[in-house]
């Protein structure tokens, strides 16, 4: 099988879109735990886990390495961005994981549904 080649712009676009998606779901998680929060704070949460996900996928790293690293970075960024105690940070991280998985499955399902529609 031939190796696929991608440009740096494509990789950057993937990271940016994934970071935006993770930032939106981080804001939803923070609102769920803290109530009304500044949406700009969530912009700090998304980029590092997005980079870990894209780099891990690009180098075919196993999930048992990348998932804990992404979760640790996610929790660290929640703690840094919102400045809450550890228990609240862990709650936001857990809710962020749930929202991200659920929204990702729904959006992926809708895209798959439209991609397989009859023409």
Image (cartoon, helix red, strand yellow):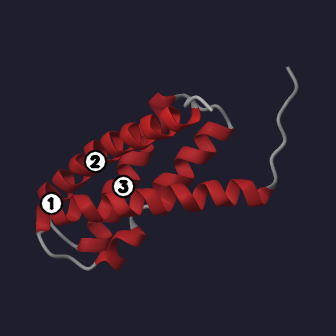
Q: Secondary structure at mark 1?
A: helix
Whether residue 44 is situated above or below residue 114 in the rendered picture:
below
Which one is in front in this view, the residue at disc 3 or the one at disc 1? Answer: 1
Q: Earlier in the sequence, mark 3 or mark 1?
A: 1
Mark 1 residue crowding within 10 angstroms, few (<14) / some (14–19) / many (20+): some
Task: Give residue 82's position: percent from left, percent from top.
Answer: 24, 72
Q: Residue furthest right?
A: 2
Residue to which mark 2 is pinned: 99
Instruction: Residue at 11%, 70% (x, y): give it.
Output: 35
Residue to which mark 1 is pinned: 32
Instruction: Residue at 13%, 59% (x, y): give it.
Output: 88
3D distance between C-alphas at marks 2 and 3? 13 Å
3D distance between C-alphas at marks 3 and 1? 16 Å
Q: Earlier in the sequence, mark 2 or mark 1?
A: 1
Task: Give residue 60's position: percent from left, percent from top.
Answer: 64, 31
Task: Give residue 92's position: percent from left, percent from top.
Answer: 21, 56
Which one is in front in this view, the residue at disc 2 or the one at disc 3? Answer: 2
Task: Give residue 10's position: percent from left, percent from top.
Answer: 73, 55
Q: Residue furthest front?
A: 119
Instruction: Residue at 60%, 46% (x, y): give it.
Output: 54
Q: Secondary structure at mark 2?
A: helix
Instruction: Residue at 68%, 60% (x, y): give it.
Output: 12
26 horizontally vs 8: left or right:
left
Residue to which mark 3 is pinned: 74
């Amino acid at each position: 099988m031939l190796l696929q080649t991608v440009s740096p712009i494509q990789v950057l676009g993937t990271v940016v879109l994934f970071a935006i998606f993770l930032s939106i779901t981080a804001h939803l998680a923070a609102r769920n735990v803290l109530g009304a929060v500044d949406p700009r704070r969530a912009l700090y949460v998304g980029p590092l886990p997005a980079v870990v996900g894209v780099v891990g996928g690009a180098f075919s790293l196993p999930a048992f390495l990348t998932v804990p690293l992404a979760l640790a970075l996610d929790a660290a960024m929640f703690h840094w961005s919102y400045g809450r105690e550890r228990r609240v940070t862990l709650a936001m991280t857990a809710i962020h994981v749930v929202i991200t998985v659920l929204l990702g499955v729904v959006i992926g399902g809708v895209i798959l549904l439209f991609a397989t529609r009859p023409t």
